[in-house]
Amino acid sequence: MKKYVFLLMTATSTATVAAPYVGLEYGVTNMSHDYSTTFSQDKVILTPDDSSSAFGGFVGYRFNEFGLELGYKKFESDDSRSKVLSYVYPVKTEREWDADLDASQFTFKPVYFYNINERLQLKTGLGLTVTKYNFDSSAYTESENDLTDIDVIVPGSYVPGASTSETALGGIASVGLEYMVIPNLALGASASYQADSVANSTSFMLSSAYYF
């Protein structure tokens, strides 16, 4: 009899910690890559490698200390230059150079949960990423009217730069903390490092997650 009671208690306890969850996250991502474009006629080189905002979401299923999580993150980086060619009020003419790198990233990773106390838990993960990179650049001359606030690209001034799109398989490692502010709702912060054959990125994210 005691054996059956023990098994029943074990099954009930397991059920209480097995649950799906969903979350949203927002933060900052810094990329390192080899994308660049050179406008030799203007002697301008652009490399979009600055930090930028990132946002995404995730769904997962936790079973005891372990879980599986599928996530999506969108981030981008850009670089630009400008040079005033002439200014006769109210019209200003500028030469503009722009380069943009957009990344859409899917992640799949096993995660491990460690309860520090009743409200605070550590969450770590190690998994795979599939990232699509879109790189585009251009140069053009723009006429700006200070009175009408209308910008017009000067005809014949547009010059396309390097442009490419590619998808890469990579890996990701993450670590973070979550705090249960109310039952089932957690706020957290995390850091992650991701790398593939095209680029590597470091992210610092704030998140909210709901455990059903």
Image (spheres, rainbow, N blue to C red):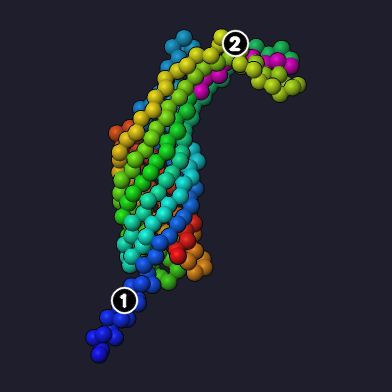
x, y percent for residue 45: 44, 19
Pointer 1 local density, CA inside 10 Å: few below 14, some 14–19, many at least 20: few
Three-letter amino acid code at the position of disc 2: Pro
The residue closer to the viewer here, 145 or 128, is 128
Earlier along the polypeptide chain: callout 2 or callout 1? 1
Label at residue 170? none
Marks 2/1: CA distance? 73 Å
Check the picture and name the quadrant holding the C terminus.
bottom left
Looking at the image, residue 144 sits to the left or right of residue 185; the answer is right
**In the rendered structure, are the residues bearing label 2 and label 1 in contact, judged by CB atoms less than 8 Å apart?**
no
The residue closer to the viewer here, 131 or 26, is 131
Q: Secondary structure at mark 2?
A: loop
x, y percent for residue 128: 31, 45
Which image quadrant is residue 12 in?
bottom left
Report the span colored magenta.
90-98
What residue lies at 52% left-to-right and 68% top-to-bottom? 182
Looking at the image, residue 170 sits to the left or right of residue 36; the answer is left
Q: Secondary structure at mark 1?
A: helix
Which image quadrant is residue 9 in?
bottom left
What residue lies at 47% left-to-right and 22% top-to-bottom? 137
Q: Report the residue marked by disc 2.
A: 155
Label at residue 11? 1
Q: Is residue 68 above or below residue 18?
A: above
x, y percent for residue 19: 39, 65
